[in-house]
Image (cartoon, coloured by chain):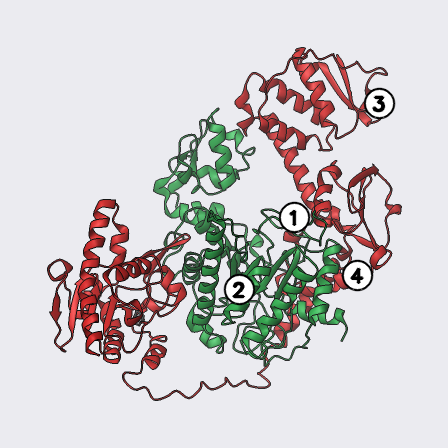
């Protein structure tokens, strides 16, 4: 089988993994003239976008899509009829370098089906990274998928070469994992995440220690995970609760939500419908509120409940807490401003800097990049005060619902 | 009227020099016309532009933020940029804080220009596609790009740092950038016909692009906001976007219609290795069983069961409250800060740490997540009760002579009822089964004491308590 055909099979097999970003690592480049590559500080670079709206920043492939496991939601499960392929280590190294030289990608995101045993699989994955780094002095981004329960030495080595390590939690609740992925063990996944966090902490301590010893390197872009949404019966509350625990327990940089989407040769046990993309979007918004806006899970969604689909979670929160509004934009605290629908973190910073010198007026909202439509019922400006009845209107929510036709997603 | 002509479209230094001089001569913004040599605006300027007014040596201060904005905004293609920048500068000299006023029209416009320039720079970093000319050692990589603004000089160093070991050129209609492996150089812009044709890898790249796309998630608008059509004509993958979109519906429909196959070779999970029949006091089996404990809800959010550790022959058993953050991650008891405190105290008291068995009353970490940390929560009575089975079975496996309960939770487990520490602390107490118990504080209590004096004092008391255990250990050693 030629490399092109392998690439088709092994990229196809990797496309259901949402965790593709190339962000948040240390700054590196190759201006010392040895080797090639660099990392973009802060945000990674998206070199292309697929028609599914997702960024392409890394060569995202599997080393092999053969797998011993039979996870029902996975296209690569042992019982699926898809074509199988396996890259050699050299093929994958060459492909990465060739793509990189043409500026198609930021680096490599390598995952693999589990073959033989966890250690053997992990060793193969690590070999690719080792070769790129040590033989070709590749300085680009490398994201490796960690195989649960792989030997500690292999994990340590993976962290030496990789920018980011990840391991997918897969399902928001343990019972679903038992049902859909009988060979996977949520305890083993968490234990591995725990080990990764201990190593990340150690590396961080060694960096801040005031010794001359070279700081230990371990996955400077941290760890991330993915959860599949919509394959099981978990509510949004359960999902977000799981995320909050994962963030707190393992210091994950990101939890990715992946709407379960139809796969070729799917199992009968799973819903074959359009993927719940809007729900996925709302979960990302809610996740964002937890990480950057100081919201608790309980504030965003009630126990056992779902996020509303028609409006975003912050607006939904504001409508449930009308008594706290309207807020005077020229006086309110940063924390309060962050809770106004339509106010992003950057807009809040701009508002705070601006109001030191001048009073903010209605006509200024556009220059502050605030959507008027969303914010106006909740704020007071020197020349704007929402009518006192406005916030009480039971039908206020109707104002915000998009036209029915806009709700359609996908096609 | 002053007519100022700058050397090039990106001549920031020229603009700065002229602007400084104009401000010092009190020339109002409306009395200046800006042009670039050979540029369109120059055609409308008079044949002999006014010489730049000689600068008297004076200077004045502007904020670093303005300079930073101006350096970027000057790369914008809008011909008005020099004038707007000057107007803003003119206003800033009397009002320094104006630059922070995001709502000011001039500030807003310059900021928007800056943003457009940086976005274009970012897109150039992303969408340049090199094509290989010549092969292997003699290879040279050449790209064609059409930037929206005058960003070639701004964007080029990025490529020099990234592709340091290969010679490359980026050709654009404005300016071309070259890297020979050592230094960057620039030459005038060229036409697209100068750019090389197809690269041998482009078909492979298109295959990748087609395969990584999930047709069931089609979101064309989202793609286009990030990758506007104006960039498409120089992207090798763009030629297949349309067919991919057109085919997506059919492919998804087909997946849904003929999906649902039954597994063709039902996989059997490898049987778990035959477990030995657990003897009541078999520690390994106990540990294995406890790893799957679901007797209370604490297992749900914790990483793992943290079981006791130490030699089977231990005659002293230390019981703590519950594992903490670090213990939960590592799977071992007393490895965090409290564990280190305990080790130190044991050594000072003369207890041989290797000969004690250490465990917790509750085997799972109880916490609530707060952003990036986990706040420890006290176990409740039902949780302590549910977990007591493991403690009891550990006791009957180890058969210790002395059990040291550290903290109220531990005491509750050891005595089987709520037992305040104050009254019982620091003396040997007989347990119904003939063993002895000793009650003391939990080392993490010492960690939490804010006052250093109180801390030192309490620590000494803790060591004294442990000395009782040390005495017992020595006696046992002599007896053996
Ligand atoms: S805390 Fe104890 S009783 Fe509760 S699940 Fe864990 S081991 Fe079982």
Instruction: Say if labels 4 and 2 share a chain.
Output: no
Circle 3 SS class: helix
Q: Quadrant of ligand 1?
A: bottom left
Binning the other alpha carbons within 10 Å of mark 3 as few (below 14), some (14 to 19) or many (20 upward) gives few
In percent of the image, x 44 and y 27: which residue is there?
Answer: A382
**Quadrant location, the N terminus of chain B:** top right
Q: Look at discs 4 and 2 and give the one toward the viewer.
A: 2
Q: Colour of chain A?
A: green
Residue identified by numbered label 3: B43
Q: Is residue B314 above or below residue B189?
A: below
Question: Given contact means CB atoms under 8 Å apart, are the residues at marks 4 and 3 in contact?
Answer: no
Q: State the SS at label 4.
A: loop
Numbered circles on residues, count = 4
* Residue at image mark 4: B201
Q: Position of residue A300 (x, y in %)?
A: 40, 53
* Whether labels 4 and 3 share one chain: yes
What is the distance, in whole Å, between disc 1 and disc 4 at their CAs?
27 Å
Chain-order first, disc 3 or disc 1? 3
Distance from the alpha carbon under mark 3 to that under mark 1: 37 Å
Q: Which x, y percent locates residue B163?
A: 73, 50
Question: Looking at this view, is B478 or A81 the one in front?
Answer: B478
Report which quarter residue B292 is drawn in: bottom left
Q: Which residue is mark 2?
A: A156
From the image, tell me which residue sits under label 1. Answer: B225
User: Does the CB distance between marks 1 and 2 fall below 8 Å?
Assistant: no
Of circles 4 and 3, the one toward us is 4
């Amino acid at each position: 089988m030629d490399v092109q055909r392998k690439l088709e099979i092994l990229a196809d097999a990797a496309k259901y993994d949402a965790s593709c970003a190339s962000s948040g690592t240390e700054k590196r480049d190759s201006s010392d003239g040895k080797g090639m590559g660099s990392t973009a500080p802060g945000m990674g670079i998206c070199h292309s976008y697929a028609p599914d709206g997702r960024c392409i920043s890394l060569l995202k492939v599997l080393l092999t899509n053969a797998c011993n496991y039979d996870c029902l939601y996975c296209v690569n499960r042992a019982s699926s009829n898809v074509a199988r392929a396996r890259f050699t280590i050299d093929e994958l190294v060459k492909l990465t370098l060739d793509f990189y030289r043409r500026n198609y990608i930021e680096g490599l995101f390598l995952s693999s089906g589990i073959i033989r045993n966890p250690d053997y699989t992990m060793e193969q994955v690590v070999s690719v990274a080792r070769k790129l780094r040590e033989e070709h002095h590749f300085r680009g981004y490398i994201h490796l998928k960690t195989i649960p329960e792989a030997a500690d030495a292999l994990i340590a080595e993976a962290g030496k070469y990789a920018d980011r390590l990840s391991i997918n939690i897969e399902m928001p609740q343990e019972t679903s994992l038992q049902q859909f992925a009988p060979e996977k063990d949520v305890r083993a996944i968490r234990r591995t995440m725990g080990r990764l966090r201990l190593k990340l902490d150690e590396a961080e301590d060694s960096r801040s220690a005031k010794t001359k010893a070279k700081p230990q390197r371990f996955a400077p872009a941290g760890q991330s995970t993915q959860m599949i949404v919509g394959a099981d019966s978990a509510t949004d509350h359960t999902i977000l609760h799981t995320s909050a625990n994962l963030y707190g327990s393992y210091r994950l940089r990101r939890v990715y939500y992946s709407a379960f989407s139809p796969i070729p040769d799917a199992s009968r046990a799973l819903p074959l419908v359009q993927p719940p993309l809007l729900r996925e979007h709302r979960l990302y918004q809610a996740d964002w509120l937890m990480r950057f806006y100081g919201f608790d899970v309980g504030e965003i969604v009630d126990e056992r409940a779902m996020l509303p689909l028609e409006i975003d979670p912050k607006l939904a929160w504001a409508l449930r807490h009308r008594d706290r509004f309207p807020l005077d934009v020229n006086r309110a605290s940063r924390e309060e401003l962050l809770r106004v629908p339509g106010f992003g973190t950057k807009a809040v910073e701009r508002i705070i800097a601006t109001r030191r010198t001048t009073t903010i007026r209605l006509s200024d909202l556009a220059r502050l990049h605030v959507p008027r439509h969303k914010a106006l019922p909740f704020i007071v400006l020197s020349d704007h005060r929402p009518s006192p009845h406005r916030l009480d209107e039971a039908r206020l929510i109707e104002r915000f619902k998009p036209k029915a036709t806009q709700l359609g997603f996908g096609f | 009227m002053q007519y100022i002509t700058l050397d090039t479209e990106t001549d920031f230094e020229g603009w700065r020099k002229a602007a400084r001089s104009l401000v010092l001569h009190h020339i109002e913004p409306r009395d200046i016309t800006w042009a670039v040599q050979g540029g369109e605006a120059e055609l409308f300027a008079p044949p002999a532009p006014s010489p730049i007014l000689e600068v008297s040596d004076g200077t004045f201060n502007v904020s670093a933020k303005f300079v930073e904005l101006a350096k970027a905004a000057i790369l914008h293609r809008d011909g008005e940029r020099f004038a707007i920048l000057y107007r803003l500068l003119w206003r800033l000299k009397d009002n320094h804080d104006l630059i922070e006023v995001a709502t000011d029209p001039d500030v807003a416009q310059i900021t928007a220009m800056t943003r457009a320039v940086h976005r274009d720079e970012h897109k150039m970093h992303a969408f340049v596609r090199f094509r290989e000319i010549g092969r292997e050692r003699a290879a040279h990589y050449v790209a064609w790009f059409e930037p929206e603004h005058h960003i070639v000089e701004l964007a080029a160093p990025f490529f020099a740092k990234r592709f340091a070991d290969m010679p490359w050129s980026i050709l654009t209609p404005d300016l071309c950038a070259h890297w020979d492996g050592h230094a960057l150089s620039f030459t005038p812009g060229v036409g697209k016909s100068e750019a090389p044709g197809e690269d041998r890898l482009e078909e492979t790249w298109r295959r990748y692009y087609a395969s990584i796309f999930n047709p069931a998630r089609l979101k064309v608008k989202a793609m286009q906001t990030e990758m506007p059509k104006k960039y498409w004509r120089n992207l090798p993958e763009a030629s297949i976007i349309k067919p991919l979109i057109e085919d997506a519906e059919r492919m998804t429909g087909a997946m849904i219609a003929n999906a649902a196959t039954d597994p063709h070779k039902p996989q059997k999970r490898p049987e778990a290795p035959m477990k030995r029949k657990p003897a009541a006091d078999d520690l390994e089996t106990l540990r294995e069983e406890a790893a799957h404990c679901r007797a209370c809800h604490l297992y749900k959010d914790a990483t793992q069961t943290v079981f006791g550790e130490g030699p089977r022959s231990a005659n002293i058993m230390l019981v703590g409250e519950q594992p903490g953050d670090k213990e939960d991650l590592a799977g071992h008891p007393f490895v965090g800060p409290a564990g280190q405190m305990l080790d130190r105290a044991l050594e000072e008291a003369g207890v041989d740490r290797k000969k004690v068995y250490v465990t917790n009353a509750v085997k799972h970490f109880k916490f609530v997540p707060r952003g990036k940390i986990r706040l420890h929560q006290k176990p409740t009575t039902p949780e302590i009760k549910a977990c007591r089975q493991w403690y009891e079975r550990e006791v009957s496996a180890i058969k210790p002579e002395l059990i040291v309960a550290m903290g109220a939770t531990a005491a509750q487990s050891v005595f089987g009822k709520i037992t305040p520490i104050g009254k019982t602390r620091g003396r040997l107490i007989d347990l119904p089964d003939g063993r002895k118990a000793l009650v003391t504080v939990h080392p993490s209590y010492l960690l939490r004491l804010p006052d250093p004096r109180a801390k030192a004092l309490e620590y000494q008391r803790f060591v004294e308590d442990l000395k009782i255990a040390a005495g017992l250990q020595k006696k046992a050693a002599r007896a053996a």
